[in-house]
Amino acid sequence: MCQTKMQSALRIFIENSKHRVFNVRKYTSQAQSKFNNTVDDSDVKHHSKFSKDWWSINGKMYGLHSFNPVRVQFVRDGLANVGHKEVNFGMPLQGLKVLDVGCGGGIFSEPLARIGANVTGIDPSTKLIETAKEHAILDKSLSDRLNYLNTTIEEHIITHAGYYDVVVASEILEHVSNQDLFLKSCVDILKPGGSLFVTTLNRTFLSLAGAIIAAEYIFGTVPLGTHEWNKFISPTQTRNILEKYGCQTKLVHGLGFNPLTNRWFWTKSTAINYALHVKKNT
Ligand SMILES: C[S@@+](CC[C@H](N)C(=O)[O-])C[C@H]1O[C@@H](n2cnc3c(N)ncnc32)[C@H](O)[C@@H]1O
């Protein structure tokens, strides 16, 4: 990496950090005035900008595309470990009602439906839900197992509390404005005995260096301005919140991403990315 590229990345990072401090204040007052809403409007607006590029494998969302093999495996194996039996070979999620919260353009929803789940994807971004619906039409085999709604979990829970067998909240916890309420809603919308799968970012010095400075400012593997470090959350905090709301932790596992090979891998370290599976008590 040449020195000038590093210097200019650091200069942009410092300037954007000043802007972020201002945003933290705005976000705090927003959360206080709308204390029962987990949506950070500026975050939804940011992601909506990429709606046209969402399904381009080598586009801005390529990190989410390459994440699919690992996270689909995480959900499939996690469910097998808590006793879910495959009734139809090749369709291990058949018969399960799965909610993909913050589904964006549907990158994770589609492969879950493809292995049998009845998936509902929800997202507060109108543009991303349009993108998800347009893309789903391309695979007719998904039409009766995939449904998208432009809504939030706070609204959806009004009619669906205790409804889902599985909730996936992948790369979303670090984008919401009230993490405690968001996680509580994810638990409340599950049936007793249901499973919640979360993937998110830890709040460490390494995650600042790896997930923001390197990913956004040096390698450009994540669009600039996607992450705010103050919204990252440690696995212990996530786990404590979920246990407070009546869940048992089944697995916490570190994840790594190699931007040179565009591959995700399991690792012992939870210092940057991690995955967590909890089961709601019966
Ligand atoms: C990084 S994208 C992840 C998309 C998808 N989960 C995936 O991994 O392919 C984050 C998504 O969270 C959505 N989002 C932001 N705040 C949200 C909230 N409070 N509730 C639900 N979704 C939210 C954004 O609109 C965006 O689509």
Image: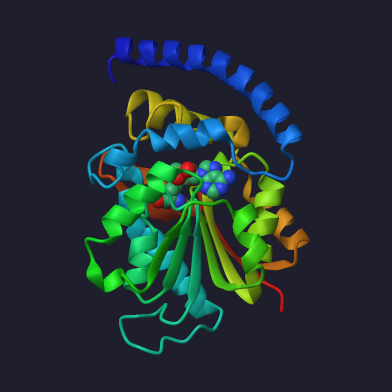
Residue positioned 46% across, 43% down in the render: 125
| 232 vs 133, nearest the viewer | 133
Q: Residue furthest bottom?
A: 87
User: Which quadrant of the rendered structure holds the C terminus?
Assistant: bottom right
Q: Is residue 199 above or below residue 115?
A: above
Colour scheme of the picture: rainbow
Q: Position of residue 16 (x, y in %)?
A: 50, 16
Q: Is residue 63 left or right of residue 195?
A: left
User: Which quadrant of the rendered structure holds the N terminus?
Assistant: top left
Write down the quadrant of residue 22 in the picture.
top right
Q: Position of residue 215 (x, y in %)?
A: 39, 32
Residue positioned 33% across, 56% down in the render: 133
Residue positioned 71% across, 49% down in the render: 180
Q: Position of residue 130 (x, y in %)?
A: 36, 49
Write down the quadrant of residue 19 in the picture.
top right
Q: Is residue 30 above or below residue 111?
A: above
Q: Is residue 37 left or right of residue 221?
A: right
Q: Position of residue 187 (x, y in %)?
A: 66, 63
- How many marks overall? 0
Q: Is residue 37 visible?
A: yes
Q: Is residue 269 visible?
A: no
Q: Is residue 261 left or right of residue 232?
A: left
Residue positioned 66% across, 68% down in the render: 161
